[in-house]
Image: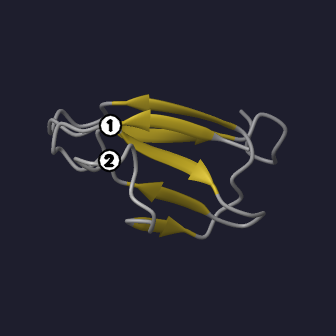
């Protein structure tokens, strides 16, 4: 299951993007009193399997993440 960490909302805290079940990827925000929040901030209806990487795609002071499916139909 894919996962990665980064500051996805730009608040300076570490957030987590990770697989949840077989058919979704969720992003949990870092909180002041907890490592990550209990409820997802964002949910993506995609297969959470593969390799996730944190990158800055557009220079907006927020991290972005890429999800690679190395064995999938679009691996190249």
Q: Quadrant of the N terminus?
A: top right
Determine crowd level at label 1: few under 14, some 14-19, many 20+ residues with C-alpha closer than 10 A.
some
Vertical arrangement, residue 52 with respect to residue 29, above or below: above
- What is the number of the mark on residue 5? none
69, 61: nearer the viewer: 61
Q: Quadrant of the C terminus?
A: top right
Q: Secondary structure at mark 2?
A: loop
Vertical relation: 22 (above or below) 31: below
Q: Is residue 57 left or right of residue 38?
A: left
Q: Earlier in the sequence, mark 2 or mark 1?
A: 1
Residue 52 in the image: state x and y as whole percent: 58, 35
| Residue drawn at point x = 51 percent, y = 39 percent | 66
63 shown above or below 45: above
The spot of residue 64 in percent (x, y) is 36, 41
Identified at 32% across, 37% down, the residue is: 14
The residue shown at (34%, 53%) is: 29
- Compared to residue 53, the image places residue 67 above or below, namely below
Q: Are marks 2 and 1 in contact (CB under 8 Å)?
A: yes
C-alpha distance separating marks 2 and 1: 5 Å
Q: Of all residues shown, which one is farthest toward the right?
A: 71
Residue in the picture at 50% in, 47% down: 17
- Residue 57 image point, x, y percent: 31, 34
Q: Which residue is mark 1?
A: 14
Q: Residues within 10 Å of mark 2 (few under 14, many from 20)?
A: many
| Displayed quadrant of residue 75 | top right
- The front one of 26 and 46 is 26
Q: Position of residue 24 (x, y in %)?
A: 64, 65
Looking at the picture, the colour scheme in use is: secondary structure
Can you identify the residue that label 2 sits on? 30
Query: What SS does tag 1 mark?
Result: loop
């Amino acid at each position: 299951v894919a996962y990665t960490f980064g500051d996805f909302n730009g608040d300076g805290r570490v957030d987590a993007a990770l697989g949840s079940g077989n058919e979704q990827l969720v992003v949990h925000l870092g909180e002041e009193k907890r490592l990550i929040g209990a409820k997802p901030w964002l949910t993506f209806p995609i297969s959470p399997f593969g390799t996730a990487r944190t990158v800055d795609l557009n220079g907006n002071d927020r991290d972005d993440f890429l999800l690679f499916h190395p064995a999938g139909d679009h691996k190249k």
